[in-house]
Image: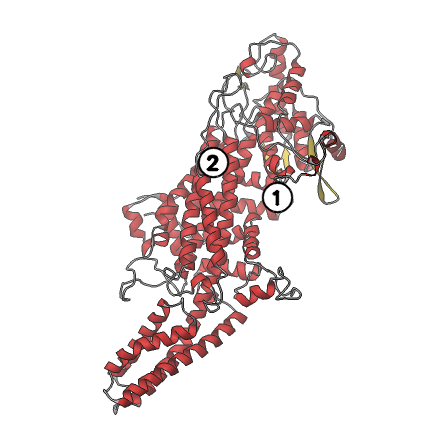
Amino acid sequence: MAPAGQFIPLLVDHWQSLRNLIIDKTKTTTIDGKALKLADVIASARYGRKAIITNQVLEHVGKDTEQVYGKLKDGEVLYGINTGFGGSANVRSQAVEEIQRGLIRGLHYGVLSGNADFDIESELPPGFTSSKPLSSPIETTSMPESWVRGSMLIRLNSLSRGASGVRPVFLERLLQLLNQDIVPRVPLRGSISASGDLSPLSYLGGVLQGKPSVQAWIDRDNRRELVSAQEALAFGQIQPIDIRAKEGLALVNGTAASAAVASLAVHEVLCLASVSQVLTAMSVETLCGTEESFDAFFAQVRPHPGQIECANSLRSFLRGSSLVADNNGSQEFSLRQERYSTRTAPQWIGPVLEDLVLAHSQVSIEINSVTDNPLINPSGKLLHGGNFQAKAVTSAMEKARQGCQALGQIMFAQCTEIINPSTNKGLAPNLVVDEPSQSWIWKGTDIYVAALQSELGFLANPVSHVQSAEMGNQSINSLALISGRYTLTAVDTLTQLAAANLVALCQALDLRALDLQFRNTLEPKFKEITRRCIDSCVQTPSSGPEFEQLINELWAKFADDTYQTTHMDSSVRFLNATDNLQARFLRKLPSTQTSLQAVQDWGITAARTSSEIYATIRAQYLANPDAKPILGVAARRLYEFVRTTLGVPFFGEEYIREADFANGIEVESPDPKFKFRTMGSMISAVYEAMRNGSLYDVVVQCFEEVDQYTV
């Protein structure tokens, strides 16, 4: 018996913890060095939740700090306290506090462009001062505030274990910065994550010292403002701290920056992996696919935990769907089985889920670890080791980033299949509700997802370009922060792809619902027209079994032909279908001139009636679209969120044309009824809902209803 995987319990527990922290603003995170959860990091980094340190923890930290001062008094040689650092550890010094200050000073080597504390423009030749920047100066050289807040929380947690030799007041000052949302400005680049993230963390030390040479973000008058560290501390009424003994080394010699970025990345990829499964279920419905491929028997004979979970989730998500069909191969010239993007989804997504469970475990351990050097053990001995080597974080990030590429690949395949009329089982080309000769509005999205997936393929390359550093002392280095940075780039790219795919799926599901309404309305009319034609040609009643079979056959063939020719405009498509049926029809009728004329008239009437009904149903559905009644439980939730909560419409060329005021020619003034004026703005709305977590909340609710089981 193979157990179901751990992804769903992990996802649900993580999200419920985060949801509680976000909703209840009175909740705080207790820092004790041992029990920090990924949800705590996300809540603090992204949503501003505050933290506390108990007096018990501070007392414990104080006792261990006394060990350091005792050993210094006894004249012991302590690395990084009365020696140099790294390859210069053979140097001895009695200027203990100056060593710590000098360490932090020397690590302020990062490039920070924009709003700098220096002026070079007055020295430049004329003309160069007016050059446009290649990119946003602050954003391209600084870490986002969420990364730094996460780093502060994780560093606090690590130092709270009492193995690093910092004073309690040091933790209290850092906690004040975090809780008052005073966030150091930290350079984006410059860490190899070998002896920890030295330079990034040094800027936390610079702000704690109140240096005029470093900067921090503060919240003044409900807007973020970048000021000097000196001004930031004064603004928060925080006393600057005098770095002592081991405190400079303890602060910078750790993996907090890498672990913070990794925490943010793992959170996002967990959510995106859950989104990919719901989008897969929606793709199955859009393509009128079958759930046969998700049968539990497949997992019984190939019991990979991730595959079991994914298949189980997909079956759960498809409950209640009117679009899922049995593919028994009875339809002529149809594929006997679904294409790979849906049929092998459990086998494709499952291994990613397993990797993410391990990545989550690695990061969860890291954020509760002591990662500086040397460390003080419970007996007071200083041990020299390498907990700062962040390879475990790199390992988690490589799996997460490659998982992004794999998830992107299946989303890309599914998205292109529903846009392409040769693979989307009867939907219009480019998902247009208008006549195919008059609209190509979704073609751009097809190109867009190809661009995004190409970028994900590049980003999936491993970050393995290790260079020996620091006088050869750091001959191996983890590059964890670099790997984490590129993983978050992949996350952003995948989020855009998922957003585009979701908007396309909602459009496709509306087209499917519209088509079902049209066919359900047309079928009795079509059969009645056919019955009247038969009655005009034969003596026997058309209600007899032979003719009833013929009527049903003609309808089935008409439906199939019109599914195959969605690239034609509707009037041409319907006439083409009835033309193709006339020979079949005539073979069942008496060979008379009357029959020939009647069938010709029948074809014209049936095609005209089809066109009229289609135009009516299309107009009615566009005015009041609602695909929910035919959808499975998961698709229904996401469709409702996109259509109602976000207000992204089911639309045609007319909507976009009237909403688009960019050219100023066709439309004289924008109409406020148009919430979205471009395809990109609709995709952006879904993207923003994913980035702020509101869409993920809906997705996780789908997983909360999935029953776990064993195979």
- Image quarter of residue 243: top right
**Number of residues whose C-alpha sits closer than 10 Å to that of mark 2, classed few (under 14), some (14–19) or many (20 or more):** many
Of all residues, the one furthest to the top in this rendering is 75
Q: Residue at x 45, y 45 (%)?
A: 454
The nearer-to-camera label among 2 and 1 is: 2
What residue type is disc 2 on?
A: Met
Of all residues, the one furthest to the front in this rendering is 126
Which residue is under mark 2? 397
Q: Residue at x 54, y 28 (%)?
A: 255
What residue type is disc 1 on?
A: Tyr
Question: What colouring style does the render use?
Answer: secondary structure
Residue 47 badge = 1
Q: Secondary structure at mark 1?
A: helix
Please provide percent x and percent y for residue 46: 60, 42
Residue 476 as seen in the image, left or right of residue 198:
left
Depicted 312 relative to depicted 672: above or below? above
